[in-house]
Image (cartoon, helix red, strand yellow):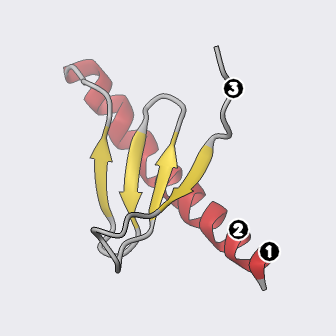
């Protein structure tokens, strides 16, 4: 199986104002930095939702830190 980085940057011409960060590890999600919308790519049961709520804020902060790091490397 292929190995991917924990975070990837993505864009799409159908969404010209959006910048997407894709989290490739569990729990997988796509974060739209334009509106901070998160799309989870996993199915969660009640037990998972509690754990997710506890870790979601940290994961989203990691994603935005990743984005800031990547952008600084372009400058």
Question: Circle 3: is it few (<14), some (14-19), or many (20+) Cα within 10 Å?
Answer: few
Marks 2/1: CA distance? 5 Å
In the depicted structure, whether residue 19 falls above or below residue 6: below
Residue 2 lies left or right of residue 34; in this view the side is right
**What residue would you read off at disc 1?**
73
**What residue would you read off at disc 3?**
3
For the N terminus, the image quarter is: top right
Question: Circle 2: is it few (<14), some (14-19), or many (20+) Cα within 10 Å?
Answer: few
Instruction: Depth check: give the residue in front, 24 or 14.
Output: 14
Q: Residue at x 39, y 42 (%)?
A: 29
Mark 3 or mark 1: whose residue is earlier in sequence: 3
Q: Secondary structure at mark 2?
A: helix
Residue 66 lies left or right of residue 21; in this view the side is right
The residue lying furthest to the left in this view is 46
Mark 3 or mark 2: whose residue is earlier in sequence: 3
**What residue would you read off at disc 2?**
70
Instruction: Depth check: give the residue in front, 54 or 39.
Output: 39
Residue 72 lies left or right of residue 39; in this view the side is right
Q: Secondary structure at mark 1?
A: helix
Q: In the rendering, at what x and y percent does residue 15 appear?
A: 29, 71
Quarter of the image where one finds residue 12: bottom left
In the depicted structure, whether residue 14 falls above or below residue 51: below
């Amino acid at each position: 199986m292929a190995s991917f980085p924990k975070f990837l940057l993505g864009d799409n011409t159908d969404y010209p104002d959006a910048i997407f960060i894709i989290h490739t590890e569990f729990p997988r999600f796509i974060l739209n930095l334009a509106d901070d919308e998160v799309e989870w790519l996993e199915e969660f049961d009640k037990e998972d939702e509690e754990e997710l709520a506890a870790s979601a804020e940290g994961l989203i902060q990691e994603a935005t830190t990743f984005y800031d790091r990547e952008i600084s490397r372009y400058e």
